[in-house]
Image (cartoon, grey):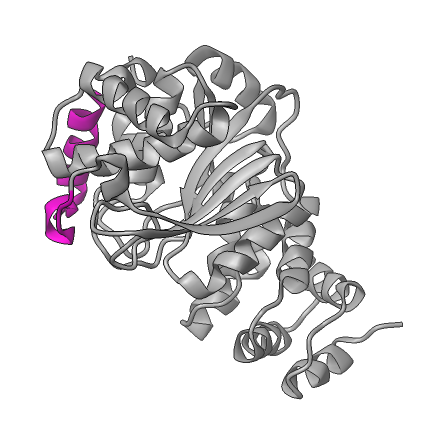
Amino acid sequence: MHNIATILDTLAGGGDLTAELAEYAFNQLTEGELSPAQAGALLIGLRAKGETAVEVGAAVKAALARAKMVPGLTGKLVDIVGTGGDHSNSFNCSTTTALYLAGMGFQVTKHGNRSVTSSSGSADAIEGLGLPMPSEPDDVAAKLNEHGFVYLFAPHFHPAFKHIMPVRKDLGIRTLFNLMGPLLNPARPTHMLVGVARPEIMQLVAEVLAMNKVEKAVVVHGAGGFDELTPFGPAKVVWVSDGNLVETELDPAELAIKPCGSEDVAVHSKEHALQVIKDLLAGKGSEAMQEMLIFNLAVALHLLEDGKTLPQCVDKAREAVAQGVGLKAIS
């Protein structure tokens, strides 16, 4: 019989948890069986020694076991999502990219939350655009069929997190839950572009995606410390395909993506952030923001379209942006 004291003692000594111990710990946490002190010690102990893919995978498994999962979805499902935390105040490129994919005929099941570190999180943008945000799993398939895009607001689908939020708030520091968000989509997308703000967790996130049997994914860390691909310089990338991981770099210059600086893709308020998305969806907006959008959209297309080279996907993305195809997703 396991007990939390033994698990905390293992972490205090710098030891990693086995899959069995990690599953027990996170089942206890998500069931609300741990005291605030025990929950805080668990999260701090994991952070102090460094979380492993086995531990994060166990946390994801426990969270999804208690989530309101979405039934009745088939075919390719895509999510474009970032961990956040890059403090960049850049425009919401992941949401704009997702809406372009929907406008191009792909099924997008975007999972997200409100912003913590930027002018506009995905939920803020979706609300501002008047797009569907169903609160019940049984409503998701109909909304997706109608719009090609549906937004799954995390608090609606993860009621077990009510046991964890007070502890996270009291701790006030990053824990493994900051990187779990992109991995907890209750629609279980088959294809994912996941941006991370810290390059040291790329391999970890990729391993957990592979453990969760995502068909194809790409984990990216953009130049400038962004959790999205940027035109500023080469990006670090880990491709995930049927459990196999390949790490590489993507240089936007080699893909004819025009360079710019971080100030060229910044937004200054929620109102500005929303207007930028509307402009980009219509094929307007600044050249720098369009180039960043094209870069992210091209990599997503490369993930989704078998046999298409990355340069071909850049051409397709550039044409879609020039035509304002993203407007189809909100009309």
In percent of the image, x 15 and y 26: which residue is there?
Answer: 279
Dominant secondary structure of the residues highlighted in magenta in the image = helix
Q: Height in image: 130 above or below 14?
A: above
In percent of the image, x 59 and y 59: which residue is there?
Answer: 163
Q: Nearer the viewer, residue 117 or 164?
A: 117
In percent of the image, x 56 and y 32: which residue is there?
Answer: 189
Q: Height in image: 44 above or below 136?
A: below
Q: Height in image: 227 above or below 9?
A: above
* Residue 113 x/y as whole percent: 41, 45
Residue sticking out furthest to the right: 1
Residue 66 appears anywhere in the view: no
Q: Quadrant of residue 162?
A: bottom right
In magenta, the rendered stretch is 259-281
Q: Does the magenta portion include 330? A: no
Apparent side of residue 144 relative to residue 75 in the rendered image (left or right):
left
Residue sticking out furthest to the bottom: 13
Q: Quadrant of residue 128?
A: top left
In percent of the image, x 61 and y 72: which residue is there?
Answer: 39
Q: Height in image: 323 above or below 183?
A: above
* Residue 100 x/y as whole percent: 33, 23
Apparent side of residue 42 relative to residue 303 in the rendered image (left or right):
right
Q: Does the magenta portion include 261? A: yes
